[in-house]
Amino acid sequence: MKIIERIPQELLDATNEFAKNLEWSRRLPIYEIHKWWARRYSGIVRLFLVYSYLDYSKLNGVKDFNKFVSKLYWDPPKIDGKTLLDPFCGGGTIVLEASRLGFESYGIEINKLAYLILTSYKELNELNIHKLKEEIVNFAKKINKELWRTKCKKGHDAFIIHTFLAWKDKKGNLQIRSNKIKDLDRYKSVYYCEKCERVFEEKPDINYCPFCDNNLYKQHNERKEYHELHPYALEYYCPICSVREIKKVDEQDIGNFFNCNLKTAKTKIQTVTKIPSLNETNRLIRNGIKYFDELLTPRQKITFYEFLKRFRGTPYEKISKLMVSDSLRSCSLLAYYSPKYKKVIPGFVIKSYWLPIQPVELNPVSFIDNGLLKPLGRGNLISSYKKIFKVLKNDYGYVRNYKVYLGASQDILKKLRKKFDIVFTDPPYADYQYYSDLSLFNLSLLHELDKEYIDYLLNKEIVLRKKNELKSYISKLLGVFTLIKERLSTNGKLIITFHHPDIKVIKEFVNIFRQLQLNLDAVYPVFGESSGKLSKRKLYLDLLFVFSKSKKESHFVPTTVYLTKEDEKLVRSIDRIVEDYNDAQ
């Protein structure tokens, strides 16, 4: 018997605690290269793959399960001669962890952005990282001089890090919801007053402008309008003074913002993809955004265009796309600046096209050339390079010999002829999260989006867009898992993680495998959602199901490692889910 079939509660608790601490402190570098919205915990994935391989006898004599778990994660056994498939591989945690352990691993993904992320990883070891750095530095210096220039307070040439923006309403009024720009320290903050149009430093807790008595904390109950974007302040770095300061924009800064020019940009740069009307994209359309490139300022758009152009046809082409895509969350009008955290809060934090009324324009190539290439601003192209460099410096044993297929699982599975020892996947949830909608912005700016792909995606993607489509959603998943059962070896395991607060929906989902006459070997509550520091979550736990073709008694244990009442409710429901599954068999 394998450990995964009878995990004791002490081991499950130790596994959850370890995985949570690992994920919430800092993800491993390979998972930091590019954001993916539904990335599962590497600790859970790697450890459960090891549990599927190790005999239960390995637990004999274990006195400290925390040490046991830590040792298994950081020094796992090599698993040779086994095959694994993830038919909904997304950002690729399962495929990456399986290949790290020695599995011959395969993934299927319909989302072109996820496919780009995973296939780009495969090229990392072939990079000449020093040549890439040289190219980026030369590009950044040129672009900063031509597009992102300003003057410091002493009149020296400086370059912009952040431009602080606000949307005007139809009457031309600047909609300032937060007058504080940045907390400098415990005793001083930088403010902007829209009434007297001053940028000034004062105590962190003032309520009124010291110059015109404007109320800086007035209530704003009126509806937000996204009529015209306007800059009011900027943060720059002056190489001569070696200072980083905030100032009010002057006429030259305003002119550069609206009328930026670049000698090498011969033609008008525009992303021709019109935003399709979907669940998430409708948020943009309702606010007057018709094209995805409208989510960038003119000079952000030119910077990214020129960056991609520089590497087109070179060995760095795919990596340059990965870097641009990674930077778009912070270098777009979906991002805003947090005075408290003193950094950009990137877009998609709440997995939505939410337009802040006071966005920030982050320079994609702001940096200090101190030999270490220090980015100025969170999440720009320089930050992306640093993350790639970190992976190459220490890859933690990851290998990138996996195979990924681009397309819908129901199409690709019909062509596959292999048998798999493990099928481990995190299928599309019925939770109204539309990662494909969010991906379209990135794909559009990378010129990877056209009508043919959008039509294919909308036709083939398995996602619940309306409450009354639950039966159709379940039916499509049943079709995919029917094909998966055919590809599962006789003694193989099907491991599924599923995240949903509604027990009825979970039971509908689990019924898929009952119809396939698969045995429910075990159910475990495991951590699956990130910390949500900026957006607190109600449910952090997933349910991890283990199925097989062999008849055996179902096993389930609770966990004492959880955070919310919804987590506790989910844990208490497991016995009912198992009972219902087996009673109907």
Image (cartoon, rainbow, N blue to C red):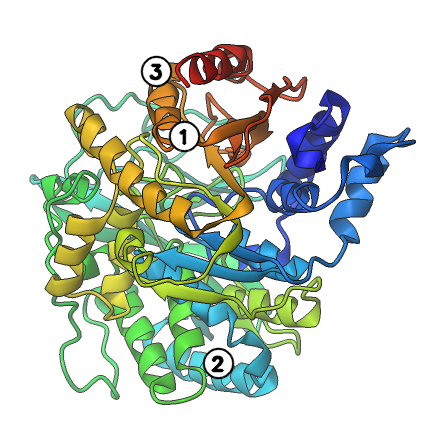
Residue 178 in the image: x percent, y percent? 36, 34
Assign a secondary structure to mark 1. loop
Gap in Å between the C-alphas at discs 3 and 2?
A: 52 Å
Residue 517's disc is 1
Residue 53 in the image: x percent, y percent? 69, 46
Specify whether 495 is left or right of 232: right
Q: Amino acid at mark 1?
A: Gln
Residue 94's disc is none
Q: Amino acid at mark 3?
A: Lys
Gap in Å between the C-alphas at discs 1 and 2?
A: 55 Å
Closer to the camera, 285 or 522?
A: 522
Closer to the camera, 311 or 210?
A: 311
Residue 504's disc is 3
Marks 3 and 1, the one that precedes in the sequence = 3
Specify whether 225 is left or right of 35: left
Tell how many labels. 3
Q: Is residue 151 above or below residue 75?
A: below
In this rendering, which labeled residue sits more in front, label 1 or label 2? Answer: 1
Image point (22%, 84%), residue name: 265
Q: State the residue position of label 2.
A: 136
Marks 1 and 2, the one that precedes in the sequence = 2
Q: In this view of the protein, can residue 327 be seen by the observer?
A: no
In this rendering, which labeled residue sits more in front, label 3 or label 1? Answer: 1
Gap in Å between the C-alphas at discs 3 and 1?
A: 20 Å
Assign a secondary structure to mark 3. helix
Q: Is residue 543 above or below residue 261?
A: above
Q: In this view of the protein, can residue 129 be seen by the observer?
A: yes
Image point (13%, 50%), residue name: 289
In this rendering, which labeled residue sits more in front, label 3 or label 2? Answer: 3
Residue 436 in the image: x percent, y percent? 27, 49
Q: Amino acid at mark 2?
A: Ile
In which quadrant will I find the N terminus? top right
